[in-house]
Image: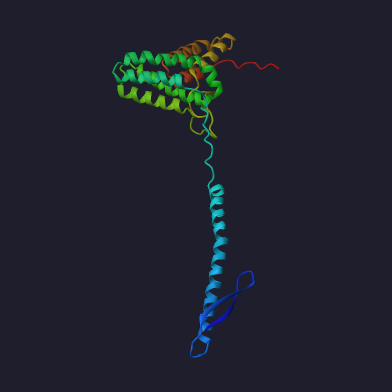
Amino acid sequence: MWRRVTARLKIRNAERRYITVSQPSRQTGADAEPQNDLIDHFGEDFDMKQLLLATALIALPVAVFSGVEHFIVGTPAAPAQQSAVPPLGDMSKFAAIVSDTQKIAATGDLVAAETRITDLETAWDDAEEELRAKAPEAWGTVDASADAAFSALRAKSPDPARVETALSDLQATLADPTPPDAAGGSAQTLNGIAVTDASGHPLPCEVMLSDLRDALSAGRASDTARPQITDLQSKATERCNADDDRRADAFSAQALALLIPAQVTK
């Protein structure tokens, strides 16, 4: 004989559901409490499974959405690379000449290396007006490094090690002609005449000599000072031809200081 027992369960939406469990009754007619306990346990277990299933169904899309959100929002795109513009522009044609000079010097033929570096001197002087106007301090940095290379190769007895170092430094300077931070710096002066830029590099000796010639042509040299000015001009020219801008500028500055002050007209 079968006895039908009904157990009531509650689920999350508070609706009442019924589960009917059929099981044989005991022939002895014993108390049915153990059967009710089993039914109660089964109801609690079913309720718990319903709760876990509902939680899982809610948590899964949240977890998936969070993962997508992390992928989209939490992983920023790499910033676009910005290439720095060299202050003097493209230096490749000058660097190529230096590279050729290095290769020649490595063979031990420093005379041929000096001949090749002269091509750089010519090209650099031709571009001086444009490059110096574009970035005066960067131009001065390269110019000073180039002068060091010229001097090393034009020494009476060129030292291969010195030549190699000077050419390597020049190549590095062409690659990055940006001068050291000169914030707060000021040009060095001699007798009140500027002989360097703000970063300490000598001014182009050709420019200072040109200023001196213009002043002499304008009649700003007194008869008493002219002999001394002429002597200083000769020394400045000799040092400038030897690529010794620092000393050439010193001589030019001394000569310029002896000139009659220019008259200012309104």
Q: Residue 118's spot in the image, x, y percent?
A: 40, 14
Q: Nearer the viewer, residue 36 or 2?
A: 2
Q: Residue furthest right?
A: 266
- 13 displayed left or right of 78: right
Considering only vertical position in the picture, is 47 above or below 98? below
Q: Residue 174's spot in the image, x, y percent?
A: 45, 25
Measuring 56% from the left and 10% from the top, which residue is drawn there?
Answer: 216
Measuring 34% from the left and 17% from the top, which residue is drawn there?
Answer: 155
Q: Quadrant of the C terminus?
A: top right
Measuring 50% from the left and 17% from the top, which residue is drawn there?
Answer: 252
Q: Nearer the viewer, residue 77 or 254?
A: 77
Measuring 33% from the left and 20% from the top, which residue is drawn there?
Answer: 103
Considering only vertical position in the picture, is 70 above or below 21? above
Which quadrant of the figure has residue 97? Answer: top left
Q: Residue 234's spot in the image, x, y percent?
A: 46, 12
Q: Is residue 33 visible from the viewing direction of this image?
A: yes
Considering only vertical position in the picture, is 180 above or below 126? below
Which quadrant of the figure has residue 165? Answer: top left
Q: Residue furthest front?
A: 1
Q: Nearer the viewer, residue 113 or 103?
A: 103
